[in-house]
Image: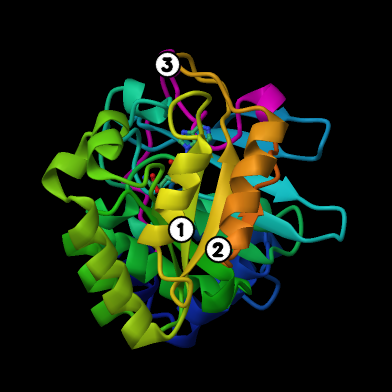
């Protein structure tokens, strides 16, 4: 790739690429900081190899410490990533795997913007590295724009590289609507114990298909079989995401059906307060607590997700870039390699 070939052409020793990658993973902001790389080479690289595949367009800060960054790729596709900060000092980054999303889940804002394309592993990692420059990161979740299992090669490569940035596979999670071919590859090809999260949102096919048209293609029974296969191989719990929509999927009867559907040896449920994106209303706190108590009584592990970044539209399901991006500076193909 670009960095490697630039180094090779200059007759640089093979360890140079590794040196540069090490600086990058530790949060260097550019070549200038890489003091063990000769100054002449640093200056040349600055001209030849863009330091990131992404350009920052704008950044929004919420009072709770959440930061949402809008980037653009060299070919003008919008990408958003979110940094979440917690009271105990943990910092998690939520990354996009695609620009936009080809799926059309009714409650998710990303589905309403035009689909762009799959992101490369470098475009995924550059979202993480952007936030690494502001401090150490603990967790990474593939819960931004896009369906990771539709871009499985790049997502798996990015997952493996996250370890270099200090985020272990156990602290990495990939979320899917239940795209089975990708889930199979995720379970079979990735040796690292990366977590799997399933966006379920309904306990039966009929309701699920209304909310998530993808259910027509991959019905519940088959999706849960793919989750069980992952669990068998990895021995790790599967996280089920369930967004709480008032009067739609939040009745106690839905909770009972969910408890009957999910094997508590395999699944942990995460109830997600709905973040307003238009067509639905979120369940009240009381309703969510009642729903959870039904799951508790069935001894199905369940938690309620903390909502972050709502005021800057950075919360789950709110990532969508609807306006046109400003035109970027012309840039050479900006693929970097360690
Ligand atoms: N396409 C993958 C990755 C995105 S994860 C997936 O769907 O799993 C984003 C998570 O936020 C998913 O669980 C999604 O269902 C949830 N979500 C979408 N819209 C939401 C909304 N308006 N409020 C709360 N959660 C939402």
- Disc 2 packing (10 Å; few <14; some 14–19; many ≥20): some
In three-dimensional space, the C-alpha distance between marks 2 and 3, rounded to whole angstroms, equals 42 Å
Task: Give the residue at x 39% y 84%.
Answer: 234
Task: Give the residue at x 52% y 28%.
Answer: 318
Please tell me in which quadrant of the rendered image residue 330 appears: top left
Q: Position of residue 259 (x, y in %)?
A: 46, 58
Q: Which residues are magenta?
A: 309-338
Please tell me in which quadrant of the rendered image residue 287 appears: top right
Residue named by callout 3: 322
Residue named by callout 1: 259
In three-dimensional space, the C-alpha distance between marks 1 and 2, rounded to whole angstroms, equals 6 Å
Which type of secondary structure does the marked residue at label 3 adopt?
loop
Q: 168 left or right of 285? A: left
Q: 111 left or right of 83? A: left
Of the pair 274 and 9, the residue shown nearer to us: 274
Q: Quadrant of ligand 1?
A: top left
In which quadrant will I find the N terminus? Answer: bottom left
Answer yes or no: do the residues labelled 1 and 2 have beta carbons within 8 Å?
yes
Q: Nearer the viewer, mark 3 or mark 1?
A: 1
Which type of secondary structure does the marked residue at label 1 adopt?
helix
> Looking at the image, how many numbered discs can be counted on the residues?
3
Residue named by callout 2: 298
Q: 244 left or right of 209? A: right
Of mark 3 and mark 1, the one earlier in the sequence is 1
Q: Magenta: predominant secondary structure element?
A: loop
- Disc 3 packing (10 Å; few <14; some 14–19; many ≥20): few
Q: Position of residue 180 (x, y in %)?
A: 20, 60
Compared with 109, 209 (above or below) is below
Which type of secondary structure does the marked residue at label 2 adopt?
loop
């Amino acid at each position: 790739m670009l960095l490697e070939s630039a180094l090779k052409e200059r007759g640089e020793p093979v360890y140079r690429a590794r040196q540069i990658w090490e600086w990058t993973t530790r949060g260097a902001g550019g070549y200038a900081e890489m003091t063990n790389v000769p100054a002449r080479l640093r200056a040349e690289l600055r001209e030849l190899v863009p330091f990131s595949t992404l350009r920052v367009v704008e950044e929004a800060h919420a009072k709770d410490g959440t930061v949402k960054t809008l980037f653009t790729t060299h070919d003008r596709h919008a990408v958003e990533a979110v940094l979440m900060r917690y009271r105990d000092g943990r910092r998690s980054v939520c990354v996009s795997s695609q620009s936009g999303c080809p799926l059309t889940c009714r409650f998710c804002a990303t589905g309403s913007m035009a689909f762009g394309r799959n992101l490369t592993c470098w475009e995924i990692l550059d979202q993480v590295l952007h936030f690494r420059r502001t401090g150490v990161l603990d967790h990474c979740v593939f819960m931004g724009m896009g369906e990771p299992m539709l871009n499985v090669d790049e997502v798996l490569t990015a997952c493996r590289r996250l370890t270099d940035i200090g985020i272990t596979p156990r602290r990495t999670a990939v979320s899917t609507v239940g795209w089975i071919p990708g889930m199979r590859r995720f379970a079979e090809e990735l040796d690292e114990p990366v977590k799997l999260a399933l966006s379920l949102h309904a306990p039966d096919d009929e309701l699920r298909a209304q909310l998530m048209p993808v259910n027509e293609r991959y019905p519940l029974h088959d999706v849960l079989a793919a989750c069980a296969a992952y669990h068998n191989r990895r021995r790790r719990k599967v996280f089920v995401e369930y967004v709480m929509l008032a009067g739609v999927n939040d009745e106690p009867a839905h909770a009972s059906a969910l408890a009957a559907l999910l094997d508590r040896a395999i699944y942990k449920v995460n109830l997600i307060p709905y973040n307003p994106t238009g067509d639905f209303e979120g369940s009240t706190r009381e309703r969510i607590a009642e729903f959870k108590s039904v799951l508790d009584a069935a001894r199905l592990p369940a938690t309620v997700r903390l909502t972050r970044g709502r005021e800057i539209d950075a919360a789950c399901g709110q990532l969508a870039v609807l306006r046109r991006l400003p035109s970027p500076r012309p840039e050479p193909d900006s693929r970097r390699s360690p």
